Amino acid sequence: MYEARDRDTPTVAQGQLDLESWMNDVRQRVDTILRGFFEQKQEESAALSPRAIDLVTEVRDLTMRGGKRLRPIVTAVAYRAASGDPDPSPTLQVGASLELLQSYLLIHDDWMDEDDERRGGPAVHFAFAKKHGNAHLGASLGVLAGDLASTFSWELFLKSTLPKGRRDEALALFVDIQKEVFAGQQLDLMADQDVERMHRLKTGSYTTRGPAELGGLIADAPRSKMESLRSWAVPVGVAFQLRDDLLSTFGTAQETGKPGDDLRHGKHNAVVAAFHKLSPSMPDRAALARVWGHPDASDADVEEATRALDGAKARVEERLICLADEARSALAASPFDDEGKQMLANVTRLLTERGS
């Protein structure tokens, strides 16, 4: 809808896809769709009210500020594996809608967590609060901006071209993705003990499983290929979030931008869950208690708590490796061609080994 189909897909001399160039092509073309979409939405909002532009601008700024476009890449690579077609064009508008879905979720997540920063810039609710000098108004406008991003996501998705006979299935999947995210977010907010269930619902649903299945539906894939995509995507999604938990706990400021925030916010992530299962010493328990759920905890106390959690690191890494191996086994047994399997294997590494 917002971009002409382009069959200039990057390849290398041997005829195999250069995956990095291919992924960059997906990113750039999704960004082109999003830029065109936001230009149209700003014109539409200006016709409603000059002030309405502010909501669109904040959603645009967050969406276009960074972001690895992982979800469009998963959708596109799943389409390639299921169809054999290296041209990602049929998936790009759906991929763009997933980026807007992520913006919606990030805007509300930052508000719930009272985070001031996202992707190297202000969180949307914080930007509004600073602009208007009113924290409650900033939060209220942030919620509205998130709601608008959700509507934008649906607008792009509904205008996407889907194979005849699979549209209803794709719409039902898009609904299910969001219901699972909401359930996972509830578990996260309540520090539920079943961390893997929370990760599978909150992150895996819209980062790997949903995008992969959407790629399969766009390819009009048969049941066997859809099942293979699901068998690959579910463990990869949990492994992706386990890696994120490790980075959030042990990563540097350069890697995460917000080291220690999971601890300060009282997140019951995989590292904390593994820590409690290890029957830690009283001093280690005390070190964690001083920072867990305390937004004003000092950097020194966070460093001490991180050292106390070090024993849990190996447990989480071991589980992550098992999940990545499960995904690779699913690929080995899948009906995809060799190049499709290799591309999915490379995306597995991209999602599970970053910053390791």
Image: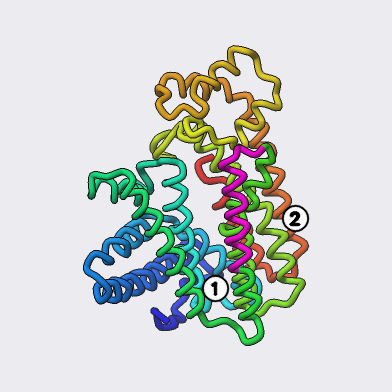
Res 15 label: 1
Q: Is residue 274 above or below residue 137?
A: above
- Looking at the image, which is closer to me, 309 or 50? 50
Give the percent coordinates (x, y) of residue 31. Answer: 38, 67
Q: For the residue labelled by badge 2, is the local secondary structure a helix, a strand or a loop? A: helix
Separation (CA) of disc 2 from disc 1:
26 Å
Dividing the picture into quarters, in which one does residue 244 lie?
top right
Residue ID at (49%, 71%): 154
Give the percent coordinates (x, y) of residue 347. Answer: 57, 57
Mostly what secondary structure, the magenta segment? helix
Q: For the residue labelled by badge 1, is the local secondary structure a helix, a strand or a loop? A: loop
Residue ID at (65%, 14%): 281
Kindly check if marks 2 and 1 are in contact, taking CB atoms under 8 A apart as contact.
no
Q: Is residue 203 above or below residue 228?
A: above
Residue ID at (44%, 33%): 259
Residue ID at (65%, 32%): 273
Q: Quadrant of the N terminus?
A: bottom left
